Amino acid sequence: MQATRFLLRGLMAVLCAALIVNPAFSDEAEDLARKAQNPVASMISLPLQNNTSFGIGPHDRTQNVLNIQPVWPVGISEGVNLITRTIVPVIYQPIGESDSKSGLGDINFTAFFSPSDPGKLIWGIGPILVLPTASDDVLGSKKWSAGPALVMLTMPGSWVIGVLVNNVWSFAGDSERADVNMMLIQYFLNYNLPGGWYFSSAPINTANWKAEEGQKWLVPLGGGFGKVFKLGSMPMNAGFQAFSNVVKPDNGPDWSTRLQIQFLFPR
């Protein structure tokens, strides 16, 4: 938890640095903002995304998940790119009234095959694999899971509008643990402003198909803002969003915040 707090303070410091305007970088920042909002852009990046959920369970506890999310595109042919996206979660999980566990969660790996020269509709499709890497039983499923993933988006004018969907099923792992059948739907709406500023709404909706009726869905609503800027010579993208969970399981969080810092490596 101390490491997570240290990283969170660092993310806040970088977000404050984003408020400093660099007019010479303005035009490039607008282009990079649109690329950063495209999950299958041919651009190497390293997002650090900190998600804090509040009001969990009967004791109103707080959970924190820091996702380390490297994105690495590879041109596998003249017309097709392979975009790999890995999510390495570092979790602080409250347990009961006062206990907690901290450590590594289950790693997610997605590989999107996407046209290198798309039309107005940009898309990517491929497999997602969940590895049972959690350092403690309560931080992961202890199951190997896999399934399909799809992303589609379009960029009319100042907008970037799209959706990312995946569903995973467990196929191996600890036989004493519950099977996995989970869906994720993330729509994203971004409106870009001059100078690299933008408004954004990208809630992550999830469905646990193995849960009881009325306990399956987590549906957040909300949004926030962000900016692409330079820290020294390094292009970066910083953003903040907040969400209220309008549908949730009985012990699910009431609301959450997301603070993201993304290191950009344009070609």
Image (spheres, helix red, strand yellow):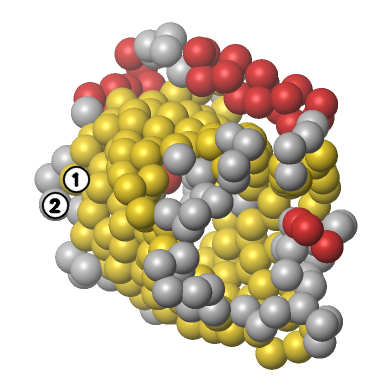
Q: Secondary structure at mark 1?
A: strand
Q: Secondary structure at mark 2?
A: loop
Q: Which residue is the extreme one toward the front? A: 58
* Left or right: where 223 falls relative to 71: left
> Marks 2 and 1, how far apart in space?
5 Å
* Residue 214 visible to an observer of this rendering: yes
Residue found at x 69% / y 90%: 171
Spot occupied by residue 54 in the image (x, y as percentages of width and height): 54, 35
According to the picture, the residue beneath numbered tag 1 turns out to be: 159
Residue type highlighted by circle 1: Trp
Spot occupied by residue 180 in the image (x, y as percentages of width and height): 62, 79
Q: Which residue is the extreme one toward the top? A: 20
According to the picture, the residue beneath numbered tag 2 turns out to be: 156
Residue found at x 54% / y 79%: 210
Residue found at x 19% / y 45%: 159
Spot occupied by residue 97 in the image (x, y as percentages of width and height): 73, 37
Cβ atoms at labels 2 and 1 below 8 Å apart:
yes
Spot occupied by residue 254 in the image (x, y as percentages of width and height): 45, 40
Front position in the image: 174 or 230: 174
Q: Residues within 10 Å of mark 1 (few under 14, many from 20)?
A: some
Which label number is shown at residue 88?
none
Q: Is residue 43 above or below residue 216?
A: above
Residue found at x 38% / y 46%: 245
Front position in the image: 248 or 168: 248
Q: Is residue 158 above or below residue 152?
A: above
Q: Quadrant of residue 229?
A: top left
